[in-house]
Amino acid sequence: MISEIKLRPQPLGVYGGTTGALLLPSAEAAEVALAGLLLGNDGFEKLWPFYDLAVKEEAELCLEALDSFQVSRLDEAWMLSYNRFVLTADASLFEKLKGELSGMPLALLEAAAYLHGFLPEPPVAPAEADQEILAYLLSTAAHHKLGTGNLSGGLSDIDAAVSAVQDVSPVFAARLLAEWAAYGHSAELSERAVEHYNKALALLEATGFHRLRAELALELGMCCQLAGDRTGVGKSRLLQAIQAYQQALLYFHREGPDPHAYGLAHMNLALVYLAMPMNDEAERLRPAIAVQSLREALKVFTRETNAKMWASATLNLANALQHVPSTHNEANLWEAVGLYQEILEVRKAEEDPLAYGRVLANQGNALAHLGAFKKAEPILAEAHSIFQSEGELDSAEAVTALLEEIKKESGIAEV
C-alpha cells in the first residue's frame, strides 16, 4: 500500500478548480521549480507539462501530456492515475486506486471523490497529514460544512487550514482567506472579512498572481463598502473601499481580460464617492469624480450587453449629474433628464412600480430645477400617484412639497 507523498510541498489549492487538486511527481531540480510554481512564477513547464496545460485550461492536451508523462520513480506512478481521476472522474480508476493507497494519498483521493460526488462526505484528515495536505483536507471538510449550513464549523476549518499552510504555500493560504471572507460578508462577520481580505492581499503581494490580487482587491472594496454601511465605522471603511477599487483598476482595463470587472470597479467606486460626506471644498469634488467613473462603467455596460448593470450605472449617473458642482449645471441637468428617459423606456411600471416612480420623481425634480415646470408637473403627478398606491407616503409627501413649490414659482394659484 502506498502511504506517502515524496515531493513536498505539493501545489494543492494554488490554482482553482480541478488544477488545485493535482499532484506533482518528483523530478530533477524539482524543489527550485516547485518554489517558483507556488508563487505563480514560470519555470516548471518542462518538468510537468501536463500541469502547465491544466493551468492554461487545455483539458484535452493536459490529458494527452499526462498519458505520455514518464515518472522518475516507479513508486510515484499512482500519481498519474490519481491526476487522471481528478480530471475525468473515472469511477474505475477510483476503485482501482482505493485498493492501492493508504494514509495521505488515500485521503486526497477520497477528497477528490467527494468533490466529484462519489462520496457523501469528505474524508477525515489522517494524523500524519501536515501543512498543505492538511490544509487541503480541512478546506474540503469546510466545503462540506458550509454546504450543509454549518457556517461556524466551516469557517473554523478554513482558519485551521490557513494556520497549517500559510508558511509553505502563501497563495493557497490567500485563497482560503478569501473564501472565508466571501462567506463572512454578513453583518456580524464583515469586520473579520475585511481583515481576511487584507491578509490575503498581503500574502499575494510578492507573487505572480496579479489577476487574483486584483480580483480580491475588488472583493475587498465591496466588503468595505458593505461594512461601512452596516457597522457605523462609516468614512474609514469607505476610504478603504476607494483604495481597494483603485488597486483593482491598476490591473483591470476596459480592453483587458475582464472588462466586466473594470466596469464594476468603476461603478462601485462612484457609489462610494457619492456616499461620502462633503464637508470641505476638496470633498465637494467627489461627485465629479463619481461622474467620470460612471461614464467609464457605461463604456462597458450597454443596454444590449448587460441591461441590468447599464440601468444601474445610468440611473446613478443621472442622479450624480444633479448634484455635481459644475459651471455647466444646466447642461448636466438636461443630460440627467435624458438619461432618466432612457431608463423609463426599458423599465416597466407594472414590474417594479416603486422603482419606476422614483425615476419619474428624479426626472421631475431635474426638470423643476431647470424651470421646465410644465414638463415637470405631469411627471411628478404620476410619481405621486404611484407612491400613494404603493403606500410610500413619505415619498408621496416629498413630491407633494415639490409640486407646491413649483406652483409658487410658476405663479399658479393653489386649487
Image (spheres, grey):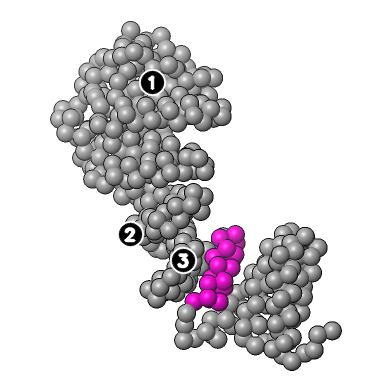
**Quadrant of the rendering where the C terminus is positioned:** bottom right
* Of the pair 151 and 207, the residue shown nearer to us: 151
Dot 3 or dot 1: first in sequence order is 1
Dot 1 or dot 2: first in sequence order is 1
Density class for disc 3 (Cα within 10 Å; few <14, some 14-19, many ≥20) is few
Q: Give the residue type that dot 2 points to.
A: Leu
Name the element at disc 2.
loop
Would residue 176 be found to the left or right of residue 311 on screen?
A: left
Would residue 147 be found to the left or right of residue 349 on screen?
A: left
Above or below, comparing residue 35 to residue 270 in the picture: above
Main SS, magenta residues: helix
From this viewpoint, which residue is outermost toward the right? 415
Q: Quadrant of residue 134?
A: top left
Per the rendering, the mark at residue 108 is 1
Q: Position of residue 371 (x, y in %)?
A: 65, 88
Stretch in magenta = 307-324
